[in-house]
Image (spheres, helix red, strand yellow):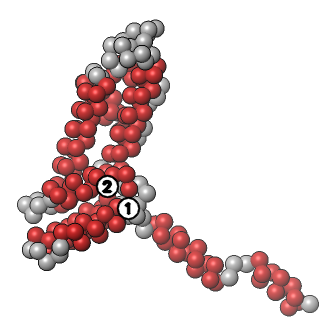
Amino acid sequence: MRDEMRADADADEPQPEQLELVFEIELLRQAEVNVDYILMLVEKFREPMLKSQVPDYQYKEQVLQAVESSPTLRDKRDLFMDFIELVNTDASVAEQWVAFISQRREQELGTLIEEERLREPAARDFMESAFDAGEVPRIGTDIGKVLPRMSFFGNTTGGESRAEVKERVLDKMTEFLERYEPLG
């Protein structure tokens, strides 16, 4: 009878194979590809690529595979591929990455400000605050200082209300924040 009870109790416990599988899944979660790993790959291949020991396409393909394997970096592949084209041996990869991301971030923010006709100093301050907070505030008076001058009650020449313009701008700013926040 004791053996039967013990067999029933053991049936409820996970088998060693199941425990190994759970461990491996957890290990995969912890080993997610991040920016530092991508920069390490770039650093690793920079010298051999310049000496023509590694074909350009193989190097790019390996970096692209690493970027594609990360859900958080997948939508930023264009930034990584553009960076690979510009990287050189004069400075460290990390320094070049910081300069590249800073320049691209400023460029894209300038484009956003121009496209939406936002008030420039206020828009830049608003986005800096959003990066510090980790989110774009959707309520409050700060967004009103950023939006272009328009009637509170009428529509714009494009037929949009102030609320629609505000929502569109906030969506674009949130997208911008999500694009650049994890990149440093």
**Quadrant, the N terminus:** bottom right
Label 2 sits on a secondary structure element that is helix
Q: Please tell me how crowded label 2 is: few (under 14), some (14-19), or many (20+) other residues with Cα within 10 Å.
A: some
Who's the residue at 27% across and 52% down the image?
79
Residue 89, above or below 116: below
Counting labels gives 2
Query: SS for tag 1?
Result: helix
**Residue in the image at 37% along x and 55% along y:** 73
- Residue kind at label 1, given as amino acid type: Glu
Name the residue type under label 2: Arg
> Looking at the image, which residue is at 36% across and 40% down?
177
- The quarter of the picture where residue 167 lies is top left
Can the viewer see residue 170?
Answer: yes
Q: Is residue 133 visible?
A: no
In the rendered image, the residue lying farthest to the right is: 1
Is there CB contact under 8 Å for labels 1 and 2?
yes
Residue under circle 2?
77
Write down the residue under mark 1: 68
Any mark on residue 123, and which?
none
Residue found at x 35% / y 45%: 179
Q: In the rendered view, would you say 8 is above or below 139? A: below
Neighbor class of circle 1 (other Cα within 10 Å; few <14, some 14-19, many 20+) is some
Q: Is residue 138 or residue 167 the one in the foreground?
A: 167
Image location of residue 55, percent across then percent down: 18, 73
* Rendering coords of residue 91 (x, y %): 11, 59
Up the image or down, 68 lies above or below 125; here it is: below
Mark sitting earlier along the chain (1/2): 1
60 w.r.t. 125: above or below: below
Q: CA distance from mark 1 to mark 2?
A: 7 Å
Q: Position of residue 83 (x, y in %)?
A: 21, 55
Q: Position of residue 115 (x, y in %)?
A: 28, 28
